[in-house]
């Protein structure tokens, strides 16, 4: 899990455990949730070099992520947090916080980091070179509102890039269905998702999200605001408070709805119009070679290099633009290793939508991370390809068995589009 996720889980757990007894339980939890990674800074010799850094966790699942390491981290952080909170309380004439609650808050959150652990899976190239892949394993414990019902499903997801979406929204349904038809003769079975369009009140083609479960940018925005951060809109106007979360229902509401329609439309327009970064390195020989390899390995059957924008109401300028997103907006069975077991409208438990590959080489610069695939398990492009299975098994095998120079050219190409 990334450090933001650890911080959020830590903050939530910190509050759940010690909010009444410890002022600043959320902040303490957020810091303690990252303690195993913070500790890494002290035990990794080259932690501050560009190659290493916090994201390159050399000692991951080493001593810092063991129970022994966690015990040391808990003692050290409890001492530090206890001293600071006591000092603060004295300055403000408040009673000193109870150390046992500080310790409970720190211990729970440090241990939560270990639970959100990774499983490692080895992979070998045709020429014998080995790489270690990692797979997340999620355990949810100490639930505040009783056990989860048997019908509850969960699936880890990372956020997708948000540029160029107007172009993808403008591709005509006919074009997308024609791609699915063409793939049948190429040994791949891309399928459209059909989902509920809550604005148009009808079934519509799904285009956005890891399983193509959103038909439009406008609906995606309202759904994310409501589902992820509890902001109501004219589409989803009821507060997102499950029956068991009584405190949630007692909170005073903001505006009715909180997101006014004009802001919703502005958000939609901005998301549709956000431009795509330009390609780079196109004149280098490796680029052309990588592009050829990409086609030969049949990556391009799903990651379709070229599409054309049709009509998009409110953004006439993009009509007719030919663009290079490297997606087909279709669902593919990607095999058991990537499956999350969670269906979504017509998408099955092993199905994922081909993600666009444009801008891939800039994700480190823009978001400080190169995490790929729906749950972020791929630390780079090589790992992402090696996880491909199901309909993409042939392409993966082509990649695994190609000469190293071809692999490198392919990576160069992918980091330049
Ligand atoms: C059968 C269709 C298919 C083929 C063929 C295919 N891919 Fe993919 N690709 C996908 C899907 C679907 C995903 C998303 C899987 C997931 O998130 O679990 C994906 C994900 C990726 C990602 C990660 C992108 C991101 O933003 O997370 C990269 C990189 C990638 N593919 C490159 C390639 C390359 C290179 C090839 C050829 C060697 C290839 N793919 C062949 C369907 C395909």
Image (spheres, helix red, strand yellow):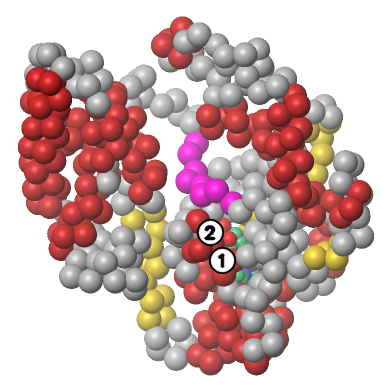
Q: x, y (%) of residue 197? A: 78, 33
Is any atom of residue 225 visible in this view? Answer: yes
Disc 2 crowd, CA 10 A, few/some/many (<14, 14-19, 20+): few
For residue 208, above or below residue 303 = above
Q: Quadrant of residue 87?
A: top left
Q: x, y (%) of residue 200? A: 84, 29
Between residues 81 and 63, which one lies in front from this camera angle? 81
Residue 37 located left or right of residue 254: left
Q: x, y (%) of residue 135? A: 40, 58
For residue 233, above or below residue 244 = below
Q: Quadrant of residue 104?
A: top left
Quadrant of ligand 1 in image: bottom right
For residue 316, above or below residue 42 = above
Residue 155 covered by magenta stretch: yes
User: Which residue bears the numbered disc 1?
Assistant: 362
| Chain part drawn in magenta | 153-160
Identify which residue is drawn at 64% across, 89% down: 284
User: Which residue bears the numbered disc 2?
Assistant: 366
């Amino acid at each position: 899990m990334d450090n933001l996720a650890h911080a959020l889980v830590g903050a939530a757990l910190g509050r759940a455990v010690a909010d009444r007894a410890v002022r600043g339980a959320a902040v303490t939890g957020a810091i303690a949730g990252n303690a195993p990674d913070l500790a890494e800074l002290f035990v990794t010799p080259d932690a501050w070099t560009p190659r290493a850094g916090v994201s390159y966790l050399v000692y991951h699942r080493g001593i810092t992520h063991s129970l022994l390491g966690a015990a040391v981290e808990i003692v050290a952080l409890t001492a530090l947090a206890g001293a600071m909170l006591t000092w603060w309380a004295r300055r403000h004439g408040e009673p000193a916080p109870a150390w046992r609650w500080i310790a409970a808050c720190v211990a729970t959150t440090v241990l939560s980091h270990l639970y959100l652990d990774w499983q490692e899976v080895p992979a070998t190239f045709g020429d014998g070179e080995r790489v270690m892949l990692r797979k997340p394993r999620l355990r949810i414990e100490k639930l505040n509102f009783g056990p989860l019902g048997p019908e509850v499903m969960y699936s880890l997801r990372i956020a997708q890039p948000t540029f160029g979406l107007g172009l993808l929204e403008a591709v005509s349904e006919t074009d997308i269905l024609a791609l699915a038809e063409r793939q049948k003769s190429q040994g791949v079975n891309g399928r459209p998702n059909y989902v509920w369009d809550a604005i148009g009140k009808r079934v519509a083609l799904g285009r956005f999200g890891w399983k193509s479960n959103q038909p439009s940018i406008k609906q995606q925005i309202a759904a994310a605001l409501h589902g992820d951060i509890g902001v109501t809109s004219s589409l989803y106007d009821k507060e997102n408070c499950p029956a068991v979360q009584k405190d949630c229902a007692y909170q005073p509401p903001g505006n009715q709805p909180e997101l006014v329609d004009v802001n919703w439309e502005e958000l939609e327009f901005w998301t549709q119009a956000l431009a795509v970064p330009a390609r780079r390195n196109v004149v280098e020989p490796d680029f052309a070679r990588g592009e050829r390899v990409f086609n030969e390995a049949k990556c391009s059957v799903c990651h379709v290099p070229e599409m054309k924008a049709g009509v998009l109401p409110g953004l006439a300028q993009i009509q007719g633009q030919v663009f290079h997103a490297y997606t087909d907006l279709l669902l593919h069975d990607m095999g058991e290793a990537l499956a999350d077991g969670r269906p979504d409208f017509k998408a099955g438990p092993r199905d994922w939508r081909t993600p666009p590959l444009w801008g891939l080489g800039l994700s480190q610069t823009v978001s400080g991370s190169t995490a790929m695939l729906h749950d972020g398990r791929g630390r780079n492009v090589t790992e992402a390809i090696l996880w491909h299975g199901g309909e993409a098994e042939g392409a993966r095998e082509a990649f695994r068995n190609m000469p190293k120079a071809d692999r490198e050219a392919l990576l160069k190409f992918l980091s330049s589009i």
